[in-house]
Amino acid sequence: MLSTLILIPLVGVLVLCLWPDKLESKTAKLISGAALAFTLGWVGLLATRFELATPGFQFEELLPWVEPLGLSYRLGLDGLSLPLLVVNSLLGLVAIYISDPKLHRVRLYYILLLVINSAVAGAFLAANLLLFFIFYELELIPLYLLIAIWGGARRGYAATKFLIYTALSGVLILGTFLGLVWLSGNTSFDYDSGLAAALPLAQQVTLLVALLVGFGIKVPLFPFHTWLPDAHVEASTPVSVLLAGVLLKLGTYGVVRFGLGLLPDAWMALAPWMAIWAVVSVLYGSLAAIAQTDMKKMVAYSSIGHMGYVLLAAAASTPLSIVATVFQMISHGLISALLFLLVGVVYKTTGTRDLTVLRGLLNPERGLPFVGSMMILGVMASAGIPGMVGFISEFLVFRGSFLIFPVQTLLCMVGSGLTAVYFLLLVNRAFFGRLAIAPPTSIPQIDLVLPQVSWRDRVPALGLATLIVAFGLQPNWLARWSEHTTLVLHQPYQGFVQARTQSAPLLSAAVADPGANPGVDVGADPVLNVPALTVPAASVPVAPHAQVSLP
Amino acid sequence: MTKTLPLATASVHPLEPFIQKLLGAEALLPDSKTNVLEVVGILKSYGVVLDAYSKNLIYIADHQFLVLFPFFKYFNGEVTLAKLLRHWWHDRINFEYAEYCMKTMLWHGGGQMDAYLDSDDFLQRCGAAIAAKIKSNPAMRGLHGLFPDFLPEQVRQLAYYSALGQFWRVMSDLFIDLSDAYDAGRVQTIPDVVAFIKAGLVAAAANPITYAVEIGGTRYDVLPKSAGLTFLMDVAVPYVEAVFFRGTPFLGTVSYNAQANQISVDQGRFDYGALYADPLPIGGAGIPPTLLMQDMRHFLPDYLTAFYQSQGRGLDDVRVKICQSFQKSMFCVTSASLQGLLPHPADTTDPTERVANHEFLAAWMDRLATSRLDVVQL
């Protein structure tokens, strides 16, 4: 069942490779699109058969591969990977749909897109550490080529920088996996949450640091982020959509799956530091975004800021915050894909992304009113305006993390406020005022007419916007898939969460005491385990019967 | 925003070529086939719209005299459910635009009419009409007693309703005639258009502007013939000044901050009129220039629709295109007006008269320096 998700795109690759005659762009697009549509349908089929109450891997597949190495082809699907697989197929489809029909080297381009999709699906499905690593590395090459061949003017620089950073990330991750298995005396690299249980804390901490740096490069987190803005600026729009929407999620997925899931003792030891790291990343990303004058760079820096929330929520490791990590990944995937998509349309239509010259694009008659409206919706979602998925994910992150790391959470909330600052700057500069795409001159000029954006170009943005609003209004449609998996992930951290909430009695008591603050009734919330203040520890709810309540 | 006018002390006026064009019976708008097509086409639809505006303005002046709550003033006396529904549906002539223009004229004043409306003769006539109108209305009598200036000011406004209605009556017919002349091949160039309009204005120049209302079977002259108000100097010129040049800062598409001195305290330095308007709307709707464009959209001649269809975004940005064409046409009307108002014949050989003509046009060109004159040349 699961291999199909990896194989369908590869079948598409095979068809593209073997296609006789000259491959027309339209044909290649159709073949790749069909492959990914089929993949999306297959994920949908899996979702219908997915048992929500089963916390572990489902639809497992196991094929022995290189046994002496401990490498097996073991795949599994759980609540963490299922939503990400949907986003992978969906955004892959969007990327293919919006690809420039006039680009050169058509065959190679679509093959690379399909290989990325297949590799990312493999990484999300892999239940063997080495297998994950193989898929993780496999996705680098096509992405490197996509930037290096079809990128902007400085594509060589950006692609090489990307390759060096992510190769280093791969080395660190491989090192961690090897260390983890060899130090624990195992022979198999199969995913097992008890893998590191017997390791001394110092070793665990060392492994976790290496793992966090490795995935931190991919996420990316400050100060390993410098490859991302360059890669985004040089990449074409479809590649940017994939990069922000899916590929960065490999980093956060890795942090949650392998850091939080495999190294609980070290995780608990480093969690406060990770929360501080998250704050630095969030604030740095947001402040850097404010300073940008390139629309695409601004959205890229906002990604750095918003990925920090995932680290904060993962560090807090409450059931709610772990759900929040999944939610934030999906939410960011959809929102950043929408924003990059729209920036791409603006660039295609006006020939610039420079916020110092773009003005008044919302002009109803001659500007890009639809794109502008979608952009406003996208930035509102990103800034966490209620009614859209960004609000739910940020609310879950803050709500889930606040009692564990109150100061860090509050500082991250400042980052949320800063999101509104830089995106309002973007909207105000580029979309309001008198229409202009060049600096004002004293030479009289004919009133500007921008080419109209066709419905064909509007459809993907509309689809993503619909999902953003739908999940914002019905968050359970998304959260239900991950609840049980996240509760299992939370299990080792019950004591930690309890201790943290007790260690901040003044603050949490003030919030938890309904008498002192009748508006906030956190004291009775089973999700945060705050009842530990009044209820014996033994009664703390444990998976799988506990429910994650969503607003 | 307050703009610094170019120094009139320069040895050669920066817009000297335009002064020469006007003296040489040419226009401020370059002569081209497309310009002729746009200008004549748009003036035809403007003529149709002006006809409706004019009829309504005169109806309001004559039949809504001192009706303080004129709910059905746009219905021209014919109130039916179908018309009411259409009014609410907004697929109608936006008579509001005509009122904006009337109020702009009232606000900026100018000409003999403004002076007459402040004269004792007017107050006396106005007083008689008011007395007749409110004699059996205790509420209005009370109002008049408390605020004796209020109803006379309403009558002044009604006088402008009537005057603008009469002015547009002539202009509407003139523009339709122009279109007919174009269709018949008698008008082929922009100078032809300007000459046609100038001839029309000159022919109507001395038409008297009068206004009388009938109350209780008695006729009350509010603007009597004896006041000597004429079409060209007392309505057309103030209209051009108020609507083409000065305009109103708060009824356009841009927001101004008066407290931050973005608007000149001197009304004479206003430049918010049609010749300065930016055709690109900025996010707003329902603002006056848009209302006029919306109205003209319904009456575009086929050749102009086809022309717009073939350009850029086709009919999707037709209102912007209409506004651009309209601005061009207004530069033609301004050309005709300035030529008609020259103190001496344009081809005079008397050096003193030539200097006077030149100075007259230079003064107007000073004001056009910040207009869209440079853009319509493109």
Image: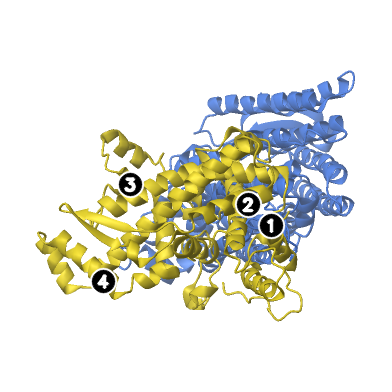
Question: Is the C-beta separation of discs 2 and 1 under 8 Å?
Answer: yes
Residue A72 is at least partly visible in this image: yes
Residue A377: x %, y % from top left: 54, 49
Q: Secondary structure at mark 2?
A: helix
Pointer 1 or 3: first along the chain? 1
Q: Secondary structure at mark 4?
A: helix
Q: Is residue B63 above or below residue A84?
A: below
Per the model, the C-alpha gap separating discs 3 and 4 is 28 Å
Pointer 4 or 2: first along the chain? 4
Label of residue B74 in the image: 3
| In this view, the mark in front (1 or 4) | 1
Q: Secondary structure at mark 3?
A: helix
Crowding near pointer 3: few (<14 within 10 Å), some, many (20+)?
many
Pointer 1 or 4: first along the chain? 1
The three-letter amino acid code for the residue at tag 4 is Leu
Q: Quadrant of the N terminus of chain A?
A: top right
Per the model, the C-alpha gap separating discs 3 and 2 is 35 Å
Q: Secondary structure at mark 1?
A: loop
Crowding near pointer 4: few (<14 within 10 Å), some, many (20+)?
some
Question: Is the C-beta separation of discs 3 and 2 under 8 Å?
Answer: no
A224, A355: nearer the viewer = A355
Q: Residue furthest bottom?
A: B9
Chain A, chosen colour in render: blue
The three-letter amino acid code for the residue at tag 3 is Tyr
User: What residue sits right under mark 4 in the picture?
Assistant: B123
Q: Viewed as shown, does residue B244 lie left or right of B357?
A: left
The three-letter amino acid code for the residue at tag 1 is Ala
Per the model, the C-alpha gap separating discs 1 and 3 is 40 Å
